[in-house]
Image (cartoon, rainbow, N blue to C red):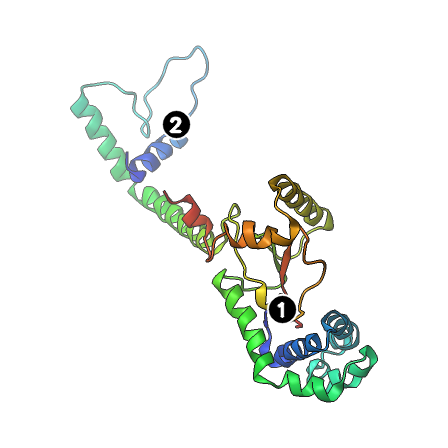
Amino acid sequence: MNMVVHPQQVRMAHQYGCAAAKQGKFLEFKEAFWKKSFEEYVTKRDASLLAPDAILKWAPDVKLDIKRLKTDAESTACKDRVDEDMAELDKFHVNGTPSFFINGSFMGGGMPKEEFQKIIDDKLKVAQASGVPGADYYAKEIMGKGLKTFRSKKQAKSP
Amino acid sequence: MSRSAVLAALVAVACTKPQAPGTTPTSNSSSPPPSGDLAARLERLEEFNKKHAEAIEFLQRVYDQQKQAADDQDANEPDPAAIFAVDITKPVAAGQAEGPTNALVTIVEAWDFG
């Protein structure tokens, strides 16, 4: 989910991600952004490499319709799309990236691949044991039974 | 027992030299032997507390600071046992998702381009 930590630099990039999704190319856009914009930015520390003008230069490489991409990215719909994600994450006090919820369990920051895999395997076992079909599992078990707002360690300790 | 009393007792223990096996307990200015009637023992304890008031107060302050820091951290960190119902309906509908819709494990990633 979109979580803009550096709004001055990448707010528009997130909106372009939304616009790319409208053309069914969200993942292609994300991958291209890392390779064509972000990697060069890391070397040169030039924030313009993350800006719309830079995106529009490589966007045709991933078969994006540039005119439509720009229009959608600047639309209220894409602005709202990013804001909606951030509002949802804010409910759970997510304030950094990367952060993950694996079937609802929060994992903050990076972690070794093996640890990540173990959590996924454990969650898979629980899900398989539930007998709930995959198509219904998130809605029924996570959305249906999970907490709708943040609960802290401190609150959990309180009687 | 109050925390101050516990701290006072800890200070008393810390200031007491261990007794060697086979030796007779000797009088020590910081930890008098438990003799005399109750009033006398209480008086000695009060004297002891008065003498070490500064150290006890310091320990109390350190304890309070560390407890506050731990409490603050616990108030900001999510309950590790909690299952949080993050609504993914909109990002999935918008095509900002990857993988099959019938997966048994769903990973929600909060990501940014920065």
Residue behind mark 2: B16
**Helix, strand or loop status at disc 1:** helix
At x 42%, y 44%, the residue is A157
Q: Earlier in the sequence, mark 1 or mark 2?
A: 2
Pick the front one: A155 or A22: A22
Question: Considering only vertical position in the picture, is B6 above or below A157?
Answer: above
Label 1 neighbour load within 10 Å: few <14, some 14-19, many 20+: few
Pick the front one: B8 or A35: A35
Pick the front one: B7 or A34: A34
**Helix, strand or loop status at disc 2:** loop
Measure how far apart labels 1 and 2 are at the Cα level: 70 Å
Question: Considering only vertical position in the picture, is B22 above or below B46?
Answer: above
Q: Which picture quadrant has residue A22?
A: bottom right
x and y, in percent, of residue A121 in the image: 69, 44
Give amino acid for label 1: Ala
Pick the front one: B46 or B26: B46
Residue behind mark 1: B93
x and y, in percent, of residue B111 in the image: 64, 66
Residue at the outermost left position: B39
Give amino acid for label 2: Thr
Q: Which picture quadrant has residue B39?
A: top left
Mark 1 falls within which chain?
B
Question: Considering only vertical position in the picture, is B41 above or below A84?
Answer: above
Quadrant showing the C terminus of chain B: bottom right
Q: Is residue B59 left or right of residue A121?
A: left
x and y, in percent, of residue B1 in the image: 28, 33
Foreground mark, 1 or 2? Answer: 1
